[in-house]
Amino acid sequence: MVEWSIAAFRGADSVRSIVVAAPPGHVHDLAGADLGVVAGGATRAHSVANALEAVGTELVAIHDAARPLLTAELVEALVADLVAHPEAAGTIAAAPIADTVKRAAQPSRGSFRTHSVRKGPRDVVAGTLDRSGLWAAQTPQLFRTAALREALAVDEATRDAATDEASLVEAAGGPVLLHPTPSANFKVTTPLDLRLAELLLADSEARTERGRG
């Protein structure tokens, strides 16, 4: 999946260099003539901070290799979006939440009984959230490099608790834009997700080959 993501970035004209934060012990597995590789850290934020040390461009994109269906077109769209809004510190790929969102809570002892074969306490609905205005954050997340460096310069506990870079930039006061993404930009978390990603990538490659023919 790392190679699929790298290929997408290589296809984007605006990309000048690529840096991969690799798991310890695998740095040399990915090293290439046009690819920078650094050792990742114990947390996401630590890995990003390590990779950021090798970045010398004005803008930087952070991407999870777990989203292998990234396209060069999406990268270029994010760059164009941020360049067009000089007041923004970043812009992130995201999708409006379409499902109804429930907030869960544990029931009090003895207040909820079930004949389900599943053992243990069951979550119950504590409320329904208004989904209007709610977006699911994805990657790539594109930032002005100086803004991201400033956002990462917080205490280690705060930095490592962040689930994405945008939340750190937001906390530092930087405006972050939302860029709608296609449904294919999903995250691979299960074997079924991986199989679907393989099928979609194979279909994309087949269409590209037919276009060349």
Image: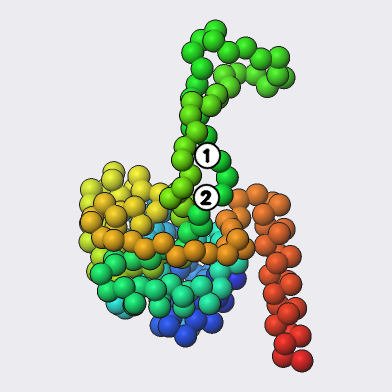
Q: Is residue 173 above or below residue 115?
A: below
Task: Write the residue at 41% across / 62% down.
Answer: 178
- Does 208 sit left or right of 99 as displayed? right
- Residue behind mark 1: 101
Instruction: Residue type at mark 2: give it.
Output: Ile
Q: Is residue 126 above or below residue 144?
A: above
The C terminus lies in which quarter of the figure?
Answer: bottom right
Q: Quadrant of residue 209?
A: bottom right
Q: CA distance from mark 1 to mark 2?
A: 8 Å
Tell me the crowding category of disc 1: few under 14, some 14 to 19, or many 20 or more residues within 10 angstroms, Cα based: few
- Does 53 sit left or right of 32 as displayed? left
Instruction: Residue type at mark 1: give it.
Output: Val
Task: Write the residue at 67% across / 57% down.
Answer: 194
The N terminus lies in which quarter of the figure?
Answer: bottom right
Of residue 183 and residue 45, the one placed in the foreground of this image is 183
Label ID, residue 89: none
Label ID, residue 97: 2
- Do the residues bearing badges 1 and 2 touch, measured as CB atoms within 8 Å? yes
Instruction: Provide residue 182's location: percent of width, then percent of height.
Output: 57, 65
Q: Is residue 35 above or below residue 183?
A: below
Q: Quadrant of residue 16?
A: bottom left
Task: Write the residue at 25% across / 69% down.
Answer: 87
Helix, strand or loop at label 2? It is loop
